[in-house]
Image: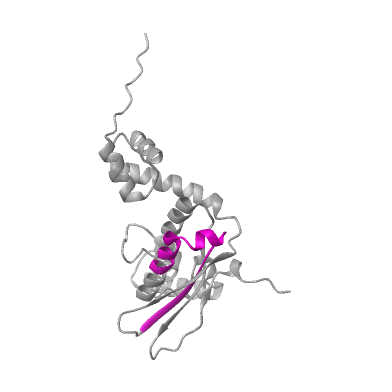
């Protein structure tokens, strides 16, 4: 006789709660809860991983539409302009896309990233940072064999602090900006990316906008 295990019973209220927390569809939420054996936190992780996998495929498609969003901090002392790209004007006009643009601009105003992605950091800058961290580790008496591990760890922290996609969202530190964008890609079904941004602060000399290299227009 078959000894097949009974299916996991998922209460409708639990599915509803997961939908409210993730904005995922009913069937996706129920499947994630079944996979997570009814554990909502594990189900959120399941949805996030699936969303990121789907987003990675969509992210390779060309994103030539979008909008320029802005945010002015209370008091008018700090302002941000950000270009957020997608594939169609239809998605660019959705409330979800416009909200994402606003949230990213607000985050930039608060945390002042220097780059969009880690790939933008120049080799000279990377080497300069590595040398500083290496010197600090050696000066603290750390043995040679662990210095490189320390430097690698500090370089990851450097990316997290200076690259927009790697920073933790100012209003929800459980997700990075890159993960937020991946979630939006999964929800809206199009490639979405930050092309560039510029942050202004009264009295501060700006170094110009930060732009994603692959999004720069081709020379004719």
Question: Magenta part of the protein: which range?
Answer: 78-103
Q: Can residue 156 be seen in this view?
A: no
Query: In the picture shown, does residue 131 fall above or below 153?
Result: below
Residue 153 versus residue 187: which sits nearer the camera? Answer: 187
Q: Where is residue 168 in the image (x, y as percent from the top left)?
A: 36, 63
- Please name whichever residue, 213 or 160, is drawn nearer the observer in this view of the structure: 213
Location of residue 41 in the rendering, given as x and y in whole percent from the top left corner: 29, 45
Left/right of residue 98 with respect to residue 44 in the rendered view: right
Q: Residue furthest right?
A: 220
Image point (46%, 85%), residue name: 206
Placement of the C terminus among the 4 image quadrants: bottom right
Q: In which quarter of the image is residue 8?
A: top left
Tell me which residue sits at (36%, 64%) in the image: 169
Find residue 109 and report its horizontal and vertical position in percent: 38, 76
Q: Which of 68 and 52 is in front in this view?
A: 68
Whether the magenta-drawn stretch holds residue 101 is answered as: yes
Q: Where is residue 47 in the image (x, y as percent from the top left)?
A: 39, 45
Q: Which residue lies furthest to the bottom in this view?
A: 203
At 54% from the left and 56% from the top, the residue drawn is 191
Quarter of the image for the N terminus: give it: top left
Write the residue at 37% across / 38% down. Answer: 32
Image vertical order of residue 47 relative to residue 35, above or below = below
């Amino acid at each position: 006789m078959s000894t097949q295990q009974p299916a996991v019973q998922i209460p409708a209220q639990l599915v509803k709660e997961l939908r409210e927390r993730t904005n995922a569809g009913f069937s996706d939420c129920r499947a994630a809860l079944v996979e997570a054996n009814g554990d909502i936190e594990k189900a959120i992780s399941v949805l996030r991983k699936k969303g990121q996998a789907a987003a990675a495929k969509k992210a390779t498609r060309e994103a030539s539409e979008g909008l320029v969003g802005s945010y002015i901090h209370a008091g008018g002392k700090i302002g941000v302009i950000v270009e957020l790209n997608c594939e169609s004007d239809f998605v660019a006009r959705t409330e979800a896309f416009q909200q994402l643009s606003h949230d990213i601009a607000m985050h930039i105003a608060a945390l002042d990233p220097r780059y969009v992605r880690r790939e933008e950091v120049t080799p000279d800058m990377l080497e300069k940072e590595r040398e500083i961290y290496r010197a600090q580790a050696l000066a603290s008496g750390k043995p040679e064999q662990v210095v490189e591990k320390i430097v690698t760890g500090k370089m990851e922290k450097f990316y997290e602090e200076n690259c927009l996609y790697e920073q933790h969202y100012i209003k929800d530190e459980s997700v990075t900006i890159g993960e937020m964008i991946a979630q939006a890609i999964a929800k809206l079904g199009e490639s979405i990316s930050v092309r560039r941004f510029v942050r202004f602060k009264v009295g501060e000399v700006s170094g110009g906008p930060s732009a994603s290299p692959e999004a720069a227009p081709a020379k004719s």
